[in-house]
Amino acid sequence: MSEFLQLVWAKGPEGRVTHDDVVRRAGTLDNWEFYNAAAIEIARKYHHGALTYRFCDGVMNDLWSAVQAGFGSGHNTLPQPVYEVYEAFDAGEYHRAEDGSDDPIADFTDPHIADLVGSFGSWGASNA
């Protein structure tokens, strides 16, 4: 597990990633390479059952907040695949069926993460 995820894991299940945490690991809030590597590691570990949905969704929400804070002159494009991974976990946050009988994590997050992990190839594999 990367130093970044070890830091977040040590904060416990309710631990939040702060912008300071990102800056300590990435150097700046506009380090797209850091975000992409973290997102790939999170997706792979979730897909292989090493991390829970709740943990990954929280971390990705916090990372997305940091990405947005990093937008500025010359850095206004969405970094990929961090945005796709964020969207995959975001899709599991709400039910589509009015009665809540669906399972948005199984129906939307899990297959999207499986597709993304399959598309990553060896990119970022050192953190897997």
Image (cartoon, rainbow, N blue to C red):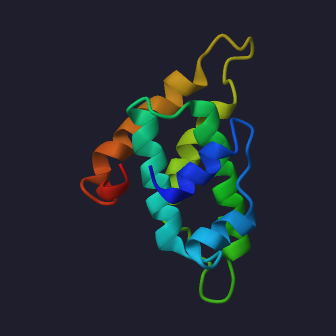
* Residue 112 in view, yes or no: no
Residue at 65 percent of width and 75 percent of height: 29
Residue at 43 percent of width and 29 percent of height: 49
Q: Is residue 2 left or right of residue 104?
A: left
Q: Nearer the viewer, residue 114 or 43?
A: 43
Residue at 57 percent of width and 47 percent of height: 87
Extreme residue toward the left, this view:
122
Residue at 51 percent of width and 24 percent of height: 107
Q: Nearer the viewer, residue 119 or 40?
A: 40
Residue 119 placement (x, y as % from top left)? 30, 50
For residue 126, above or below residue 9: below
For residue 8, above or below residue 37: above
For residue 4, above or below residue 98: below
For residue 70, above or below residue 111: below
Residue 99 placement (x, y as % from top left)? 74, 11
Extreme residue toward the bottom, this view:
73
Q: Is residue 118 left or right of residue 7?
A: left
**Which quadrant would residue 52 be assigned to in this image?**
top right
Residue 104 placement (x, y as % from top left)? 59, 25
Q: Nearer the viewer, residue 104 or 51?
A: 51
Task: Tell how many labels.
Answer: 0
* Residue 24 in view, yes or no: yes
Residue 51 placement (x, y as % from top left)? 51, 34
**Which quadrant would residue 56 be assigned to in this image?**
top right
Q: Nearer the viewer, residue 14 or 107?
A: 14
